[in-house]
Image: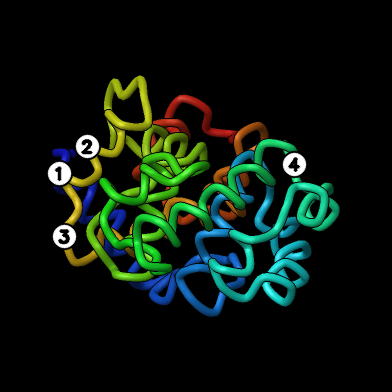
């Protein structure tokens, strides 16, 4: 099967079976999503969603978060992974939004990565979810699933996988494909014990070809 045929088949599957894929993080505006995505690094969305409501209530905007201190914010996120660093990142992020961006969340990857706690993956999530920009955030799920399905070949880093995916997925579907791959990896194509028996993509899957019992 040629590369584009493989991409077309995978895309067709998800368009039929997961047409409304979206982030599982709870948020009401770009600022809230930015907080949630920063907290989600090496942490589950479920845990983040348990934590953010109290943060959103106490700090509804960048100004309120920028003016708080470590001791006030830390107790609200102590159950999240790496709470010390993330507490500092959230306060620094809010302060930079005020000083550099007029209190608004910027919508370019180049600007977002200047914020404390924001790397390329986080910036891609924000711009693709909020603005539907054709940016592909490659987390562990996307990296694993895209390799197993043969969408990426020889990709050694998230950036190299991102470039291959962006090149071969139609621009208007990139923002949605990000969620397709994440959700498939989260619930079906698990890292250690993939649920191949429940997967409708086994006919295309290079991993399944080598491991037919999953």
Helix, strand or loop at label 4? It is helix
Report how far apart the C-alphas of labels 3 and 2 lie in the structure.
Answer: 12 Å
Please give the name of the residue rendered at 61% of the width and 51% of the height, measured from the top-left corner. Answer: 91
Q: 212 or 193: which is nearer to us?
A: 193
Helix, strand or loop at label 2? It is helix
Please give the name of the residue rendered at 45% of the width and 52% of the height, measured from the top-left corner. Answer: 96
**Figure quadrant of the N terminus:** top left
Q: Quadrant of residue 66?
A: bottom right
**Figure quadrant of the C terminus:** top right
Image height check: is 13 above or below 75?
A: below
- The residue labelled by disc 3 is 171
- The residue labelled by disc 2 is 163
Horizontally, residue 160 falls left or right of residue 123, namely left
Report how far apart the C-alphas of labels 4 and 3 lie in the structure.
Answer: 36 Å
| Tags 4 and 3 touching, CB below 8 Å | no
Residue 197 visible in this rendered orientation of the protein: no
Of circles 4 and 3, which is in front? 4
| Tags 1 and 2 touching, CB below 8 Å | yes
């Amino acid at each position: 099967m040629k590369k584009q045929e493989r991409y077309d088949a995978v895309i067709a599957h998800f368009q039929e079976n997961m047409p409304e894929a979206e982030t599982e993080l709870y948020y009401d505006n770009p600022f809230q999503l930015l907080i949630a995505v920063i907290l989600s690094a090496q942490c589950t969305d479920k845990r983040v969603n348990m934590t953010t409501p109290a943060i959103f209530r106490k700090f509804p905007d960048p100004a309120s978060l920028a003016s708080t201190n470590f001791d006030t914010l830390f107790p609200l996120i102590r159950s999240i992974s790496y709470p010390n660093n993330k507490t500092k990142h959230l306060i620094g992020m809010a302060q930079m939004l005020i000083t550099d961006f007029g209190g608004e969340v910027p919508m370019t990857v180049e600007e977002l990565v200047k914020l404390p706690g924001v790397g390329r993956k986080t910036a891609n999530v924000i711009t693709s979810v909020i603005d539907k920009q054709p940016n592909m955030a490659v987390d562990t799920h996307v990296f694993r699933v895209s390799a197993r399905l043969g969408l990426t070949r020889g990709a050694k880093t998230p950036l190299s996988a991102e470039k291959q995916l962006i090149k071969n997925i139609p621009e208007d579907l990139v923002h949605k494909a990000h969620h397709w791959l994440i959700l498939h990896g989260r619930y079906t194509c698990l890292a250690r014990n993939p649920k191949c028996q429940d997967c409708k993509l086994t006919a295309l899957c290079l991993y399944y070809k080598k491991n037919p019992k999953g």
